[in-house]
Image (spheres, rainbow, N blue to C red):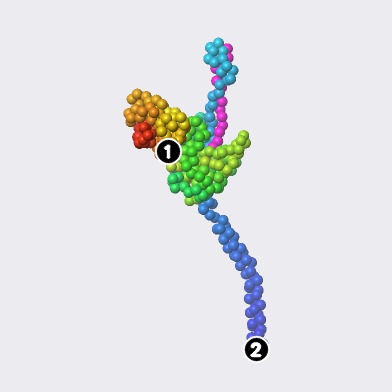
C-alpha cells in the first residue's frame, strides 16, 4: 500500500512538472490562435479590394506649356509700332501639375482625366513599386473629361471594369489616388472609404465640359485624386474620381465628391484608343431659345418648359426631318428639356452620325422626331 502511494505521489509530481514545463508552449499557442483570429477578423471586403486595386493605381506628373498675354499688350491691341519696340508680348510658361490614373490593360494603357493630362507636354507615371515611366498621350476628350495615356512595357497589373449602371446607393465606395502628390513620399495610393450617395447627377461646372450621370460619394477626394478609380467592395472600378464641391477659397473637401461613371468612360476610351479623339464636328442646323410664360401661353402650353426653334438653316439636318420654326422641343434623348443649357448638354456629348430622338410640340400636339447629326462640311 505504501509502495502504491509512493508511485502515485511521484506520478502526480511528474505530471505537474510536465504541465509547468509545457505551460509556456500552450500559452504561446493560445496567443497565436487569438492573434490569428483577430487578424482574420480585420480582413474584410474593403481590405481585400485595397490589396487588389492598389498595384494598378498610378501617380501622374505632368508638364504643360501655358501662354499668357501681357495686359499692356492687350491695351495697345495689335499696334505694329508697339510690337516693333516691345516685341511679342505673349508669355509662355511651363506649369507643373499632378493627378492620378489607373492601368486598364496588361500592355500599359492608363485612364485619367482630360484636366489632368489633356494638355500635357510631358507625362511621367509613377507605379506603386516606385518605378517611373514616360507616358504617351493617346487621345483626350475635353467634353467628357477623359484622357487615355500609355506607358511602354508588359505584364502590368490592371483593374477590372465594373458596370456603373448597376451601382447601388448606399454601397461601399472606395476612392484611390495621389492627393497632394503623396506618391513622391510613399509610392502607394491613398485610400478613402465612403458610400455611394447618389447616381445620375448632372452638374454645370464648366462651359467646355459635360458632367452628366455622375456618381456622388462621400469618400474623401482631394487635389490630386482626379483620374483615380472609384471602386466597389468587390474590386470593380465603377467610376473615375473627377470633381469635388469645395468650401470657398480653401478648396477643401466638404463631403461631396463626384466620379464619371465607368460605362460612359468605357465608350470614350475605345474611341480614343482607335481614333485619338472624339469626332464632334457636326451640325443640327437649328437655333433655339427658352420658352417663357408669354410664349407658353401663346402656344397653349400649361407651363413654361422646353425650347422653341427660332431658326432653321436650309438643307440642314433639322430641315430634312421636317422641323419648323415655332416647334417646341420638350425632350431630347429621353431627357426633359427645361432650358437651352439642357439642349447644349445633350448635343455636346454627341458625335457625327448619332441620332437625336426628340419629343416635339406643334399645334397643341406632340410627336417624335429622329434627327441624324451630319458632319459639318
Q: Please give the label number shown on residue 112.
A: none
Dominant secondary-structure state across the stretch colored magenta: strand
Q: Position of residue 26 (x, y in %)?
A: 61, 67
Residue drawn at the location 60% of the way across and 65% of the way down: 30
SS at mark 2 in the image: loop
The 10 Å Cα crowd at callout 1, few under 14, some 14 to 19, many 20 or more, is some
Q: Nearer the viewer, mark 1 or mark 2?
A: 1
Q: Going by the picture, which residue comes out furthest to the bottom?
A: 1
- Residue 45 part of the magenta-drawn span: no
Distance between mark 1 and mark 2 Cα atoms:
101 Å
Residue drawn at the location 57% of the way across and 40% of the way down: 222
Please state which of residues 30 and 68 is positioned toward the viewer in this rendering. 68
Specify whether 134 is left or right of 330. Answer: right
Reply above or below: 42 against 237.
below
Q: Quadrant of the N terminus?
A: bottom right
Please state which of residues 87 and 244 is positioned toward the viewer in this rendering. 244
Q: Position of residue 351 (x, y in %)?
A: 39, 33
- Residue 91 part of the magenta-drawn span: yes
Residue drawn at the location 50% of the way across and 37% of the way down: 203
Q: Could you tell me if residue 302 is visible in this image?
A: yes
Tell me which label, 1 or 2, sits earlier in the chain.
2
Q: Could you tell me if residue 375 is visible in this image?
A: no
What's the magenta region?
Answer: 85-104
- CB under 8 Å between discs 1 and 2: no
Q: Which residue is mark 2?
A: 1
Please state which of residues 162 and 347 is positioned toward the viewer in this rendering. 347
Specify whether 40 is left or right of 340. Answer: right
Residue drawn at the location 47% of the way across and 31% of the way down: 293
Q: Which residue is mark 1?
A: 335
Amino acid at each position: 500500500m505504501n509502495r502504491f502511494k509512493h508511485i502515485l505521489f511521484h506520478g502526480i509530481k511528474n505530471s505537474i512538472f510536465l504541465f509547468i514545463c509545457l505551460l509556456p508552449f500552450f500559452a504561446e499557442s493560445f496567443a497565436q490562435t487569438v492573434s490569428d483570429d483577430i487578424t482574420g477578423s480585420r480582413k474584410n471586403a474593403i481590405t481585400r479590394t485595397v490589396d487588389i486595386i492598389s498595384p494598378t493605381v498610378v501617380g501622374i506628373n505632368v508638364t504643360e506649356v501655358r501662354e499668357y498675354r501681357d495686359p499692356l499688350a492687350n491695351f495697345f491691341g495689335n499696334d505694329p509700332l508697339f510690337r516693333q519696340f516691345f516685341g511679342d508680348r505673349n508669355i509662355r510658361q511651363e506649369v507643373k501639375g499632378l493627378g492620378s490614373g489607373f492601368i486598364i490593360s496588361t500592355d500599359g494603357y492608363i485612364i485619367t482625366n482630360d484636366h489632368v493630362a489633356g494638355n500635357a507636354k510631358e507625362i511621367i507615371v509613377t507605379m506603386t513599386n516606385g518605378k517611373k515611366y514616360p507616358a504617351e498621350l493617346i487621345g483626350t476628350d475635353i467634353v467628357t473629361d477623359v484622357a487615355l495615356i500609355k506607358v511602354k512595357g508588359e505584364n502590368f497589373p490592371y483593374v477590372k471594369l465594373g458596370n456603373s449602371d448597376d451601382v447601388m446607393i448606399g454601397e461601399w465606395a472606395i476612392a484611390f489616388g495621389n492627393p497632394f502628390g503623396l506618391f513622391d513620399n510613399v509610392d502607394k495610393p491613398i485610400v478613402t472609404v465612403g458610400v455611394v450617395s447618389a447616381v445620375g447627377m448632372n452638374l454645370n461646372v464648366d462651359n467646355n465640359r459635360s458632367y452628366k450621370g455622375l456618381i456622388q460619394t462621400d469618400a474623401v477626394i482631394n487635389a490630386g485624386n482626379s483620374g483615380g478609380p472609384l471602386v466597389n467592395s468587390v474590386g470593380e472600378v465603377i467610376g473615375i474620381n473627377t470633381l469635388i464641391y469645395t468650401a470657398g477659397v480653401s478648396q477643401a473637401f466638404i463631403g461631396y465628391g463626384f466620379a464619371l461613371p465607368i460605362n460612359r468612360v468605357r465608350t470614350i476610351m475605345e474611341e480614343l484608343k482607335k481614333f485619338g479623339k472624339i469626332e464632334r464636328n457636326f451640325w443640327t442646323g437649328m437655333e433655339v431659345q427658352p420658352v417663357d410664360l408669354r410664349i407658353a401661353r401663346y402656344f397653349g402650353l400649361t407651363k413654361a418648359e422646353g425650347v422653341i426653334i427660332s431658326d432653321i438653316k436650309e438643307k440642314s439636318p433639322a430641315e430634312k426631318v421636317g422641323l419648323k420654326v415655332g416647334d417646341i422641343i420638350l425632350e431630347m434623348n429621353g431627357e426633359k428639356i427645361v432650358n437651352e443649357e439642357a439642349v447644349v448638354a445633350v448635343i455636346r456629348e454627341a458625335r457625327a452620325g448619332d441620332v437625336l430622338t426628340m419629343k416635339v410640340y406643334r399645334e397643341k400636339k406632340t410627336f417624335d422626331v429622329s434627327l441624324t447629326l451630319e458632319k459639318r462640311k
